[in-house]
Image (tube, rainbow, N blue to C red):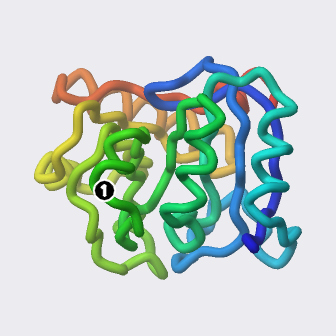
Amino acid sequence: MRKINELFYSLQGEGYNCGIPAVFIRFSGCNLQCPFCDTQHNTGEWMDDAAIVTEVMKYPAPLVVLTGGEPSLFIDELFIKALLATGKKIAIETNGTCPLKLSEETRKQIWITISPKDFLEGSKAPILMQECDELKVVNVGQELSHYFDMKAHHYFLQPCDFGDAKKNQENLQMTIQSCLQDTRWRLSLQTHKMIGIR
């Protein structure tokens, strides 16, 4: 049984897969405490793998996104293989502080996004995962150069949503400048918030 905060169908709003229709499986629970987290960890429904797969198959999405919370705390080989058997592509969004309990063969079949939160108070756990398909860094003005020590195919820099329009605009401009100054970065925006979808 796995505690699911919510399962819904929408468009991926950020990062490499932005704009792709996706089923989002949001797990309830995390090992970090980020002030901008969009998951209510005290709520959720316990579901078995068969029920989750049945729900996923109700939608025509080509992609399933495992997010949270921290999905690496809840997934395992059996669960990922059950999702892969649907024929859909699987992506996981993780903070990188917990190893994935997956075989090397299975890991190669899923898209791994690491979004490190090492710059936040309450989020000082060491980043154990050092390799991914996509590194997506939430930018609050922290030092950025060390993120390139991590091996990724794509490096995204995304301005943090502070919930304050003036502060957000200043941070967006700072993030744009960071991308212009170091062209290894690619700008990621939370387009789902901009167009009013989940």
Q: Which residue is mark 1?
A: 142
Indicate left or right for 111 with 2 as reference: left
For badge 1, the amino acid type reads Gln
Q: Secondary structure at mark 1?
A: loop
Indicate left or right for 94 with 82 as reference: left
Q: Quadrant of residue 23?
A: top right
Indicate left or right for 178 with 76 as reference: left
Please tell me which residue is depicted at 55% across the width and 23% down the height of the picture: 18
Indicate left or right for 51 with 29 as reference: right
Q: Pinpoint residue 195: horizontal percent, then vertical percent.
A: 76, 21
Using the image, determine if residue 102 lies above or below residue 3.
above
Please tell me which residue is depicted at 82% across the width and 28% down the height of the picture: 59
Please tell me which residue is depicted at 28% across the width and 54% down the height of the picture: 104
Using the image, determine if residue 168 lies above or below residue 72.
above
Nearest the viewer among 72 and 146 is 72
Nearest the viewer among 74 and 161 is 74
Nearest the viewer among 158 and 141 is 158
Q: Circle 1: is it few (<14), some (14-19), or many (20+) Cα within 10 Å?
A: few
Using the image, determine if residue 110 lies above or below residue 191.
below
Q: Pinpoint residue 66: horizontal percent, then vertical percent.
A: 60, 50
Quarter of the N terminus within the rendering: bottom right
Q: Pinpoint residue 73: horizontal percent, then vertical percent.
A: 54, 73
Quarter of the C terminus within the rendering: top right
Q: Residue furthest left?
A: 149
Q: Pinpoint residue 158: horizontal percent, then vertical percent.
A: 45, 38
Please tell me which residue is depicted at 64% across the width and 60% down the height of the picture: 68
Q: How many marks?
A: 1
